[in-house]
Amino acid sequence: MRPNVIVVFTDQQRWDTVGPLTPNLDRMARHGTQATVALTPQPVCAPARAALQTGRYPTTTGVYRNGRVLPPEERTLAHHFGAAGYATGYIGKWHLAGTEPVPEERRGGYRSWLAANALEHTSDAYRTIVYDEANEPVLLPGYRSDALVDAAVRFVADHAGEPFYLFLSFLEPHHQNEVDDYPAPDGYEQRYQGTWMPPDLAALGGTAHQHMGGYLGQVKRLDEGLGRLLDALRSMDLLDDTIVAYTSDHGNHFKTRNGEYKRSCHDASLRVPLALRGPGFDGGGAISRPVSTLDLPPTLLEAAGLPVPAEMQGRSFLPLVRDPRGARGPRRCSSR
């Protein structure tokens, strides 16, 4: 029996937020596999997302900056899992289409759809609006990341009798664009303001001293949502049969390297959390060799027993889970 697959994807989460603040993710990493040096192929939203959907470099897909759309001929994880008989679903932020709502032909092959192209523009912290398969707006109740977790639990419950692949894409801990703020759940910003500051931000300044409380509050609530999702899988007797991968598109340097929060080639922007649990990953420990989120698509396909397409440029790191000292094959060069 092939495993189910869930990708839990955050937006703009620094690699060093994993640990005491995130006990559910930390426990998942200790039980499963953690890539301690995980890097995005490009520290910008759309290019990083295109790479994670296709396993191909942004310069290959043409999505090398924000504002570019994923070409409809590109094959995504949804296409590959769908062709193998999986129910496929996408929930949350897409950011790979040029319109809102996203027309069916621009959804990357996902069959079940509850998403917005730019969730930061269709919603705020306590008003989450996404679109369904018919492109009708849907208002999800609760704090935004909680609302998306609730939708993910419903998807799992609806597809518990068949293999499924779900991509759950949060906006948090990204800032709310129109107010340039990090709206955490009520009380969470106050709980974490002044409690911790990464050394690079402490030295360089930027906006971190203003925003770190809200940012960490968002990360904390994301981790609580991850715990609820894992509990739901356990309650449906699906946890041991489901691969759960957790990562982010890029990090956050809080305007210390340029006038925005990302788009710099420093650890603060490039490094992201990456942990997996479930079949093939439980007991894997820590991978200390650098891996890329470009490598996640072939890794998930191989772990599910599916062929890795020749056009994918990422390399599966499943061999490193089996043998941390082992070698992997060479990356495939771009053909475009």
Image: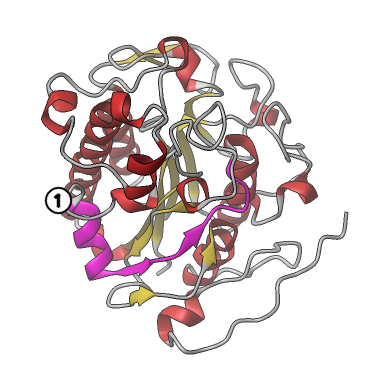
In the drawing, does residue 15 fall left or right of residue 298? left
Q: From the image, tell me which residue sits under label 1.
A: 235
Image location of residue 272, percent across then percent down? 44, 52
Near-viewer residue (70 or 254): 254
Q: Is residue 13 above or below residue 132?
A: below
Q: SS at mark 1? A: helix
Quadrant that contains the C terminus:
bottom right
Question: To which quarter of the image does residue 48 belong?
Answer: top right
Looking at the image, residue 273 sits to the left or right of residue 55; the answer is left
The stretch of residues the image draws in magenta is 23-43
Specify whether 91 is left or right of 264. Answer: left
Residue 131: image x %, image y %? 48, 18
Asked whether residue 34 is drawn in magenta, I would say yes
Residue at the location (30% across, 23% down)? 210
Neighbours of disc 1 within 10 Å: few (<14), some (14-19), many (20+): few
Identify the image quadrant of the N terminus. Answer: bottom left
Q: Position of residue 7 (x, y in %)?
A: 42, 50
Place of residue 142 in the rendered image (x, y in percent of width and height, measured from the top left)? 23, 19
Type of residue at label 1? Answer: Ser
Q: Residue at x 31, y 17 (%)?
A: 125
